[in-house]
Image (spheres, helix red, strand yellow):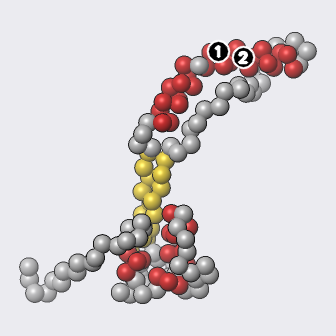
Amino acid sequence: ISRSHEIIIRPQSFSQLDCICIHCKHVTNCSAYHFVEQQHGQPHINKTPNWEPRDGSPTINVHIRPDEDKTTENELGKMWQEHEEETRRAEESYAESNDGKQVDEDEALFGSTQYDLSGTTSYEYDVIECDDFVE
């Protein structure tokens, strides 16, 4: 390594947030960090930050991760397997509540079975660059 390069080793943060903000002197009063805390569902360091980075900064990476446990994939498979039976029940229910009238092709049907498709994706927000970063 040449002497003109400096290696900076930062200690591992105890924060769940993995962004450069935690090492910045503005972190306790920064509106951008407040946004990142909010996206992570974390308690705020400062409920009313009044310092804002300059326009065009910071750069925030958003990591989008699919559900790892295949819950959604299993629910979608179940939904497709039960589709014909659920459609038949929805058509019968429609006819019962509409004096025997058959459902039109353009009519929306709603089945009684509920499928859990929540938790399909998680999002992580990390500030990776900021023009106003000061250690």
Q: CA distance from mark 2 to mark 1?
A: 6 Å
Which residue: 38% across, 75% down? Answer: 20
Residue 89 image label: 2
Specify few, some or many for label 2: CA neighbours under 10 Å numbering under 14, 14-19, or 20 or more.
Answer: some
> Percent from the top left, x then y, of residue 131?
41, 82
- Which amino acid does the dot numbered 1 rest on? Glu
Which residue: 47% across, 55% down? Answer: 123
> Percent from the top left, x then y, of residue 86?
66, 19
Is residue 54 at all visible to an observer of this figure?
no
Determine the secondary structure under disc 1.
Answer: helix
Most foreground residue, 3 or 88: 88
Left or right placement of residue 63 versus residue 36 in this view: left
Q: Looking at this rendering, what residue extends furthest in the right direction?
A: 99
> Percent from the top left, x then y, of residue 93?
79, 18
Determine the secondary structure under disc 2.
Answer: helix
Specify few, some or many for label 1: CA neighbours under 10 Å numbering under 14, 14-19, or 20 or more.
Answer: few
Most foreground residue, 63 or 18: 18
Q: Identify residue for label 1.
A: 85
Q: Quadrant of the C terminus?
A: bottom left
Is residue 36 at all visible to an observer of this figure?
yes
Left or right placement of residue 116 versus residue 88 in this view: left
Instruction: Judge whether 42 appears above or below 2 on screen.
Output: above
Quarter of the rendering containing residue 58? bottom left
Left or right placement of residue 119 versus residue 132 in this view: right
Most foreground residue, 48 or 101: 48
Instruction: Judge whether 117 appears above or below 50 on screen.
Output: above
> Percent from the top left, x then y, of residue 65?
42, 49
- Which amino acid does the dot numbered 2 rest on? Arg
Residue 46 image label: none
Residue contact at pointers 2 and 1, CB within 8 angstroms: yes
